Image (spheres, helix red, strand yellow):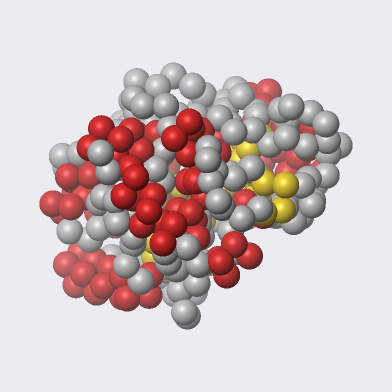
Amino acid sequence: MHAMLPLLKGTTFPPLFRRRIDTLQVNLGYRCNQACFHCHVNAGPERKEMMGSEIVDQVLDVLRQRRIGTLDLTGGAPELNPHFRYLVAKATRSGARVIDRCNLTILNEPGFDDLAEFLAQHRVEVTASLPCYAKDNVDRQRGDNVFASSILGLQKLNALGYGRDHSGLVLNLVHNPLGPTLPPPQPDLEAAYKRELGNHFGIVFNRLFTLANMPIARFGSTLVSQGKLASYQRLLRSAHNPANTEHVMCRTLVSIDYRGYVYDCDFNQMLGIPIVAAGRPRLHIADLLQTDLQGAAIAVADHCYGCTAGQGSSCGGALDDSR
């Protein structure tokens, strides 16, 4: 695995500054039942890192005391953390909007047979990764039989009301390109997903989010090995849309790793670029009870162009999808 940060430090990306935090994005651990080619977390079945109960309780304290409206749970597969259900139940009881970034296949793993029902019971918003509506493309990126298992997971969610009009159970899908290219226009691709998944499998969902692949971790290292990192970075820089910098997620979101350390975003977390604020070289989640990050500078490097290229890319999809 190549070290990516030294290759991305030098940048002309414009300076960014924080606004009020409205989202805690919490990485519950790097263990996953899949090992996807594009994964910027380098997650997989052999990873052992998991957030413990003490940090989970600190997440709940910050969520409540700072009156942060959204808890965005990610991994790995966040559901593999033994405290996942406790955290979800406590957060939803407090009135927070909870998002589960689900890989769909986890819904079919032994011991997780009732996971879909749990998510529906607590009105959790599901944002599910499905890089394509075609079997060959998904299995090539994510592994054999992942497409079939993903479709089964979607059908389970649909049967509970997810993605259906007036159910209040939100189901969004996430598309990543197969390689070092920009995603196509989000509205057009969403229409294609809805047509193909609906016609062939009877599947419905609310929105499709398109995300650019970040040149970090497993994907970035592969680009280095293939000699494609420089050309991909040129593509991202040439497609930079300055208007997208107003809407990037790092302005209003903080990312928490499994140990409780705080980062500007999930990508900076994977690169090991900490938030530096209030005279501290490294912030922990407990510090957020006393530290106001509004107005603080956001740490940027060359990978940040992945969030502003073309229509832009964020955890909520394209920043400008012309809707």
Left or right side of 161 for 265: right
In this orientation, does residue 87 appear? no
Q: Give coordinates of residue 203: x percent, y percent.
A: 28, 65
Seen in the picture, residue 282 relative to 220 is either above or below; the reply is above
Q: Which residue is drawn at 22% across and 61% down?
A: 133
Residue 77 found in image quarter: top left
Viewer-proximal residue among 21 and 56: 21
Q: Position of residue 12 (x, y in %)?
A: 55, 51
Taking depth in this image into account, of 103 and 185 the one nearest to the observer is 185
The image quadrant that residue 245 belongs to is: bottom right
For the N terminus, the quadrant is top left
The image quadrant that residue 161 belongs to is bottom left
Q: Residue at x 47, y 79 (%)?
A: 322
The residue at the point 83 percent across, 35 percent down is 278
Specify whether 211 is left or right of 275: left
Q: In this view, does 274 lie to the left or right of 34?
A: right
Residue 291 in view of the camera: yes
- Furthest-right residue in view? 290
What is the residue that sits farthest to the left in this orientation?
Answer: 136
